[in-house]
Image: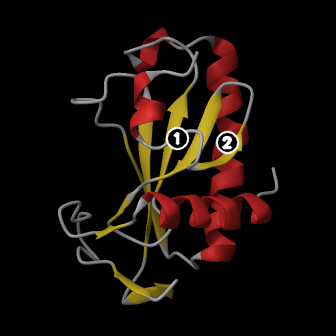
Amino acid sequence: MTNPTARKFGYPRSLVAETGSWLVLVRPQQPTFGSLVLVCKETAEAFSDLSPAAFADLKTAVDGIEALLRDAVGYEKINYLMLMMVDKDVHFHVLPRYDGSREYGGNSFPDAGWPGQPQLASHVALGEDEAAALAADFAARWRA
């Protein structure tokens, strides 16, 4: 059974990739182009509760994410935010960071916080179909 956090972020339509322990999803609210959510499939609400296998598999997920976003976005930095205040399952918000903006699907995606902290309130909100289309595009580029 998929956890509530994955479902909140549009799983399964937003699925980019899946490893043994992790789901890589398109984040519907895009503070920067290519923003993702990395959700652990284990039942855990604390990072320290993850199994050794999930920690080991995190490397596979991160390698795949960074290769994908390097190619698709051309980021300069990447931020992994583990907030878990509202959505309690272990997950990260993955934000590619860059100076300027990126264009995709008729939208412009500026990085409003560059070069400082990401500005989560400033975002492009993708509709369900737009998020699914971006997820399919990213899934086709995934190599891990």
Dot 2 alpha-carbon crowd within 10 angstroms: few under 14, some 14 to 19, many 20 or more: many
Q: Earlier in the sequence, mark 2 or mark 1?
A: 1
Drawn side of residue 137 relative to residue 132, left or right:
right
CA distance separating discs 2 and 1:
8 Å
Q: Position of residue 85 (x, y in %)?
A: 22, 29
- Determine whether, in the image, residue 98 is placed left or right of residue 69: left
User: Residue 55, located in which quarter of the rendered image?
Assistant: top right
Residue type at mark 1: give it: Leu
| Residue drawn at x 60%, y 66% as measured from the top left | 133
Determine whether the residue tagged by mark 2 lies in a helix, strand or loop: helix
> Residue shown at 73%/40% (left/top)?
60
Residue 38 - label:
1
SS class of the residue under badge 1?
strand
Kindly check if marks 2 and 1 are in contact, taking CB atoms under 8 A apart as contact. Answer: yes
- Quadrant in which the N terminus appears: top right
Residue visible at 22% across and 30% down in the picture: 86
Q: Is 134 drawn above or below residue 23 in the view shown?
A: below
Q: Which mark is residue 52?
A: none
Residue at the (64%, 21%) spot, across then down: 54
Where is residue 118? Give x, y as percent: 26, 64
Residue 76 image position (x, y, % from top left): 49, 76
The front one of 76 and 130 is 130
> Going by the image, does 127 lie left or right of 18?
left
Q: What residue sits right under mark 2 in the picture?
A: 61
Residue 130 drawn at (x, y percent):
50, 67
Q: Does residue 41 appear left or right of residue 79 in this picture?
A: right
Q: Name the outermost residue toward the front.
A: 129
Q: What amino acid is found at the position of numbered circle 2 in the picture?
A: Ala
